[in-house]
Image (cartoon, grey):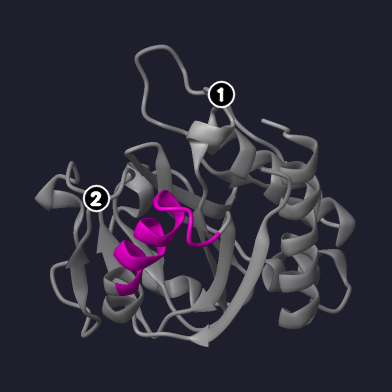
Amino acid sequence: MSGLERVDLGEVPYGEAVAAMAEWVRERREGEAGDRLFLLEHPAVITYGTRTPPAELPARTGIPVVEVDRGGQATYHGPGQLVGYLVVDLRERGPADVVRWVENALIAALGTLGFPAIRRDTPRGGQSLVGVWTPDLKKIASIGMRIRGGVTSHGFALNVDPDLGVFDTFVACGLPEAPMTSLAEQAAALGRPAPAEDEVRDAVAAAFGATARAGAR
Protein backbone atom coordinates (compact mmCIF):
# COMPACT_ATOMS: atom_id res chain seq x y z
CA MET A 1 0.00 0.00 0.00
CA SER A 2 1.60 3.23 -1.10
CA GLY A 3 -1.07 5.89 -1.21
CA LEU A 4 -4.40 7.19 -0.05
CA GLU A 5 -7.03 8.21 -2.59
CA ARG A 6 -8.96 11.39 -1.83
CA VAL A 7 -12.70 11.26 -2.55
CA ASP A 8 -14.70 14.52 -2.23
CA LEU A 9 -18.41 13.92 -1.74
CA GLY A 10 -19.86 17.34 -0.81
CA GLU A 11 -22.88 17.30 1.51
CA VAL A 12 -24.21 13.82 2.27
CA PRO A 13 -26.99 12.97 4.77
CA TYR A 14 -25.51 11.02 7.66
CA GLY A 15 -27.65 7.91 7.13
CA GLU A 16 -26.67 7.71 3.47
CA ALA A 17 -22.97 7.93 4.32
CA VAL A 18 -23.19 5.21 6.97
CA ALA A 19 -25.12 2.96 4.58
CA ALA A 20 -22.50 3.52 1.88
CA MET A 21 -19.64 2.85 4.30
CA ALA A 22 -20.33 -0.89 4.36
CA GLU A 23 -19.84 -0.98 0.59
CA TRP A 24 -16.64 1.12 0.81
CA VAL A 25 -15.27 -1.33 3.38
CA ARG A 26 -16.29 -4.35 1.29
CA GLU A 27 -14.55 -2.92 -1.78
CA ARG A 28 -11.38 -2.36 0.21
CA ARG A 29 -11.43 -5.77 1.85
CA GLU A 30 -11.91 -7.52 -1.49
CA GLY A 31 -9.25 -5.47 -3.23
CA GLU A 32 -11.65 -3.65 -5.56
CA ALA A 33 -10.35 -0.29 -4.31
CA GLY A 34 -7.32 1.00 -2.47
CA ASP A 35 -7.16 2.98 0.76
CA ARG A 36 -9.41 6.01 0.57
CA LEU A 37 -10.16 9.20 2.49
CA PHE A 38 -13.73 10.40 1.95
CA LEU A 39 -14.17 14.13 2.65
CA LEU A 40 -17.70 15.42 3.13
CA GLU A 41 -20.14 17.44 5.20
CA HIS A 42 -23.36 16.35 6.90
CA PRO A 43 -26.61 18.16 7.51
CA ALA A 44 -27.10 18.74 11.26
CA VAL A 45 -27.10 15.49 13.26
CA ILE A 46 -25.96 14.34 16.70
CA THR A 47 -24.40 10.87 16.71
CA TYR A 48 -23.26 8.66 19.54
CA GLY A 49 -21.27 5.47 19.97
CA THR A 50 -22.64 2.32 21.55
CA ARG A 51 -21.14 3.01 24.98
CA THR A 52 -22.58 6.52 25.41
CA PRO A 53 -24.56 6.91 28.67
CA PRO A 54 -28.12 8.20 28.04
CA ALA A 55 -27.51 11.11 30.42
CA GLU A 56 -24.95 12.52 27.97
CA LEU A 57 -27.46 12.82 25.13
CA PRO A 58 -29.56 15.95 24.47
CA ALA A 59 -33.08 16.04 25.90
CA ARG A 60 -34.51 18.07 23.04
CA THR A 61 -32.80 19.99 20.25
CA GLY A 62 -34.82 19.53 17.06
CA ILE A 63 -31.72 17.87 15.59
CA PRO A 64 -31.80 14.14 14.74
CA VAL A 65 -29.97 11.91 17.25
CA VAL A 66 -28.54 8.69 15.81
CA GLU A 67 -26.75 5.72 17.40
CA VAL A 68 -23.84 4.41 15.32
CA ASP A 69 -21.44 1.45 15.50
CA ARG A 70 -18.20 3.38 16.04
CA GLY A 71 -15.96 4.13 18.98
CA GLY A 72 -16.28 7.39 20.82
CA GLN A 73 -19.26 9.03 22.44
CA ALA A 74 -21.73 11.72 21.41
CA THR A 75 -20.76 14.42 18.94
CA TYR A 76 -22.33 16.85 16.50
CA HIS A 77 -22.01 16.98 12.72
CA GLY A 78 -23.31 19.86 10.67
CA PRO A 79 -22.66 22.60 8.14
CA GLY A 80 -19.25 24.20 8.54
CA GLN A 81 -17.62 20.99 9.72
CA LEU A 82 -15.23 18.87 7.65
CA VAL A 83 -15.90 15.16 8.11
CA GLY A 84 -13.36 12.60 6.99
CA TYR A 85 -14.05 8.87 6.72
CA LEU A 86 -11.01 6.60 6.39
CA VAL A 87 -11.31 3.21 4.73
CA VAL A 88 -7.85 1.72 5.14
CA ASP A 89 -6.71 -1.91 5.10
CA LEU A 90 -4.48 -2.36 8.14
CA ARG A 91 -3.67 -5.93 7.11
CA GLU A 92 -1.30 -4.49 4.50
CA ARG A 93 0.36 -2.27 7.08
CA GLY A 94 0.72 -4.48 10.11
CA PRO A 95 -0.29 -3.40 13.62
CA ALA A 96 -1.03 0.31 13.66
CA ASP A 97 -2.41 2.91 16.02
CA VAL A 98 -4.82 4.41 13.52
CA VAL A 99 -6.22 6.94 16.01
CA ARG A 100 -2.73 8.30 16.63
CA TRP A 101 -2.24 8.54 12.87
CA VAL A 102 -5.44 10.58 12.51
CA GLU A 103 -4.43 12.90 15.35
CA ASN A 104 -0.97 13.46 13.90
CA ALA A 105 -2.27 14.11 10.38
CA LEU A 106 -4.81 16.66 11.59
CA ILE A 107 -2.19 18.41 13.73
CA ALA A 108 0.07 18.63 10.69
CA ALA A 109 -2.75 19.99 8.53
CA LEU A 110 -3.65 22.66 11.06
CA GLY A 111 0.02 23.59 11.33
CA THR A 112 0.23 24.25 7.60
CA LEU A 113 -2.80 26.52 7.95
CA GLY A 114 -1.07 28.45 10.74
CA PHE A 115 -3.05 27.06 13.68
CA PRO A 116 -1.09 25.29 16.43
CA ALA A 117 -2.71 22.11 17.71
CA ILE A 118 -1.79 19.35 20.12
CA ARG A 119 -2.65 15.82 21.17
CA ARG A 120 -3.46 15.13 24.81
CA ASP A 121 -2.52 11.94 26.64
CA THR A 122 -5.26 10.16 28.52
CA PRO A 123 -4.73 10.22 32.30
CA ARG A 124 -4.35 6.81 33.87
CA GLY A 125 -7.87 5.69 34.74
CA GLY A 126 -9.31 8.90 33.33
CA GLN A 127 -11.68 9.78 30.51
CA SER A 128 -10.57 9.47 26.91
CA LEU A 129 -8.85 12.54 25.50
CA VAL A 130 -8.76 11.25 21.94
CA GLY A 131 -8.92 14.08 19.42
CA VAL A 132 -7.09 17.27 18.51
CA TRP A 133 -6.89 20.29 20.79
CA THR A 134 -5.72 23.89 20.72
CA PRO A 135 -2.90 24.87 23.09
CA ASP A 136 -5.47 26.42 25.46
CA LEU A 137 -7.15 22.98 25.67
CA LYS A 138 -10.20 23.54 23.53
CA LYS A 139 -11.21 20.64 21.32
CA ILE A 140 -11.16 21.37 17.60
CA ALA A 141 -11.44 17.87 16.11
CA SER A 142 -13.18 14.70 17.27
CA ILE A 143 -12.29 11.14 16.28
CA GLY A 144 -14.37 7.97 16.31
CA MET A 145 -13.08 4.89 14.47
CA ARG A 146 -14.08 1.32 13.89
CA ILE A 147 -11.90 -1.59 12.76
CA ARG A 148 -13.49 -4.80 11.50
CA GLY A 149 -11.68 -7.54 9.63
CA GLY A 150 -8.57 -5.40 9.46
CA VAL A 151 -10.28 -2.51 7.63
CA THR A 152 -11.04 0.85 9.23
CA SER A 153 -14.19 2.92 8.88
CA HIS A 154 -15.63 6.15 10.29
CA GLY A 155 -13.05 8.80 11.07
CA PHE A 156 -12.90 12.42 12.23
CA ALA A 157 -14.79 15.70 12.34
CA LEU A 158 -12.85 18.98 12.16
CA ASN A 159 -14.66 22.14 13.23
CA VAL A 160 -14.10 24.74 10.52
CA ASP A 161 -17.02 27.10 11.20
CA PRO A 162 -19.99 25.12 12.59
CA ASP A 163 -22.63 26.29 15.07
CA LEU A 164 -20.67 25.65 18.27
CA GLY A 165 -23.77 26.32 20.38
CA VAL A 166 -25.13 22.87 19.50
CA PHE A 167 -22.31 21.30 21.52
CA ASP A 168 -23.71 22.95 24.64
CA THR A 169 -26.92 20.89 24.41
CA PHE A 170 -25.25 17.57 25.28
CA VAL A 171 -22.02 16.15 26.70
CA ALA A 172 -19.71 16.23 23.72
CA CYS A 173 -17.27 13.30 23.52
CA GLY A 174 -18.07 12.36 27.12
CA LEU A 175 -16.09 15.38 28.39
CA PRO A 176 -18.42 17.86 30.13
CA GLU A 177 -15.59 20.22 31.02
CA ALA A 178 -14.00 20.34 27.55
CA PRO A 179 -15.03 23.41 25.52
CA MET A 180 -15.30 23.02 21.75
CA THR A 181 -13.78 25.49 19.31
CA SER A 182 -13.42 26.00 15.57
CA LEU A 183 -10.93 27.37 13.09
CA ALA A 184 -13.18 30.41 12.63
CA GLU A 185 -13.19 31.08 16.38
CA GLN A 186 -9.44 30.59 16.63
CA ALA A 187 -8.83 32.87 13.65
CA ALA A 188 -10.98 35.60 15.20
CA ALA A 189 -9.00 35.35 18.45
CA LEU A 190 -5.79 35.78 16.43
CA GLY A 191 -7.21 38.75 14.53
CA ARG A 192 -6.95 37.03 11.16
CA PRO A 193 -9.42 35.77 8.55
CA ALA A 194 -10.61 32.19 8.79
CA PRO A 195 -9.32 29.81 6.11
CA ALA A 196 -11.69 28.90 3.30
CA GLU A 197 -13.25 25.43 3.47
CA ASP A 198 -11.50 24.39 0.25
CA GLU A 199 -8.16 25.40 1.75
CA VAL A 200 -8.86 23.31 4.83
CA ARG A 201 -9.87 20.29 2.75
CA ASP A 202 -6.69 20.52 0.68
CA ALA A 203 -4.48 20.81 3.77
CA VAL A 204 -6.14 17.84 5.45
CA ALA A 205 -5.96 15.66 2.33
CA ALA A 206 -2.30 16.55 1.81
CA ALA A 207 -1.41 15.71 5.41
CA PHE A 208 -3.11 12.32 5.28
CA GLY A 209 -1.59 11.56 1.90
CA ALA A 210 1.92 12.39 3.11
CA THR A 211 1.64 10.21 6.20
CA ALA A 212 0.12 7.34 4.20
CA ARG A 213 3.05 7.40 1.76
CA ALA A 214 5.52 7.51 4.63
CA GLY A 215 3.71 4.72 6.50
CA ALA A 216 3.64 7.06 9.51
CA ARG A 217 1.74 6.16 12.64
Q: Main secondary structure of the magenta part?
A: helix
**Res. 165 image quadrant:** bottom left
Cβ atoms under marks 1 and 2 closer than 8 Å: no
How crowded pointer 1 is (Cα within 10 Å; few <14, some 14-19, many 20+) is rated as few
Near-viewer residue (166 or 48): 48
Inspect the image, locate mark 2, and give the three-letter code of the amino acid beneath it. Answer: Gly
Which residues fall within the magenta stretch?
20-33
SS label for mark 2: loop
Near-viewer residue (122 or 84): 84
40 in relation to 52, above or below: below
Residue 117 in view here: no
Q: CA distance from mark 1 to mark 2?
A: 21 Å
Q: Which residue is mark 1?
A: 121
Residue 210 in the magenta stretch? The answer is no
Inspect the image, locate mark 1, and give the three-letter code of the amino acid beneath it. Answer: Asp
Q: Which residue is mark 2?
A: 49
